[in-house]
Image (spheres, helix red, strand yellow):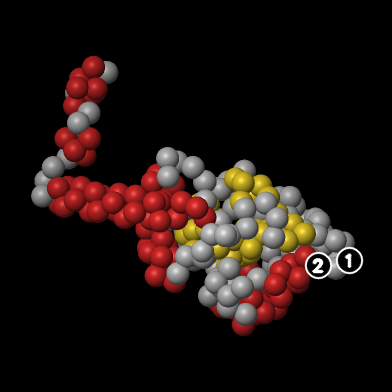
């Protein structure tokens, strides 16, 4: 069984950001960019608690609110359905009370303004005012495809204003080390730019520009 990352590791992943992590794991794990944070300032990192709901129903989400551990990110396959909002401000309050770190749903939510004001990270395909039923069976704690990416329970979800990325739970230490090394390299590049070096010089693409007549 894979050990859950500690709080310091999750905070470090959050600081690195989704784009850096994506680059640092050979450009794997990028979730469909149509699944976006309700606010660009939202950031999240935590183990995935996977949930599958039938479109138009949120019974499985209520189950997940009881079963998820503090620090988990609810990762919900709602089949991209956009004609109902299975998550709103009341469920957000319940999630915050239980210490859940955030929600990522392949679908829409409602009460989005209240959710943003509550400071709870939610990534979705947008908002829909229509409600849902609560009588269809769903599933939780299963592998699922979310925004085009396979997510296993316990895989790490990192999200920010750029979107979401999935890290295989077995590769967290290696990915974090690579991401931090990339951050250090980019900081050195920033210093060179501030010192007057051009990005053309840093990237070494002068010959390509000459080749293509871009002089």
92, above or below 1, in the image: below
**Would you identify the image quadrant in which residue 52 lies?**
bottom right
- Judged from the image, the secondary structure of the residue bearing numbered disc 1 is loop
Q: Decide: marks 1, 2 in contact (CB < 8 A)? A: yes
Q: Which mark is residue 59?
A: 2
Residue at screen point 42% across, 45% down: 25
Residue lying farthest to the right in this orientation: 135
Residue at screen point 71% across, 75% down: 66
Query: What is the CA distance from the residue labelled 1 to the residue labelled 2?
Result: 6 Å
Q: Quadrant of the N terminus?
A: bottom right
Q: Residue 62 in the image: x percent, y percent?
A: 75, 71
Left or right: residue 170 compared with residue 48: left
Residue at screen point 55% across, 72% down: 71
Residue 38 seen from this side:
no
Q: Nearer the viewer, residue 124 or 54?
A: 54
- Judged from the image, the secondary structure of the residue bearing numbered disc 2 is helix
The residue where tag 1 is placed is: 135
**Would you identify the image quadrant in which residue 92 lies?**
bottom right
């Amino acid at each position: 069984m894979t050990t859950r990352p500690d709080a310091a590791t999750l905070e470090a992943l959050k600081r690195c950001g989704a784009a850096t992590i994506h680059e640092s794991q050979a450009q794997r794990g990028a979730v469909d960019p149509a699944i976006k944070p309700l606010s660009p300032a939202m950031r999240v990192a935590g183990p995935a608690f996977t949930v599958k709901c039938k479109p138009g129903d949120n019974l499985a989400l209520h189950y997940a609110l009881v079963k998820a551990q503090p620090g988990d990110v609810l990762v919900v396959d709602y089949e991209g359905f956009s004609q109902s909002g299975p998550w709103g401000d009341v469920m957000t309050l319940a999630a915050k009370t239980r210490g859940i770190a955030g929600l990522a749903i392949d679908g829409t939510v409602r009460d989005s303004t209240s959710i943003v004001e509550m400071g709870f990270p939610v990534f979705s395909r947008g908002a829909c005012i229509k409600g849902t039923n609560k009588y269809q069976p769903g599933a939780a704690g299963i592998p699922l495809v979310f925004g085009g990416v396979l997510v296993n329970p316990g895989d790490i979800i990192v999200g920010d204003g750029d979107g979401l990325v999935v890290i295989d739970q077995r590769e967290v230490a290696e990915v974090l080390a690579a991401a931090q090394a990339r951050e250090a390299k980019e900081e050195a590049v920033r210093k060179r730019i501030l010192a007057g070096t051009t990005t053309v010089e840093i990237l070494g693409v002068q010959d390509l520009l000459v080749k293509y007549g871009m002089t």
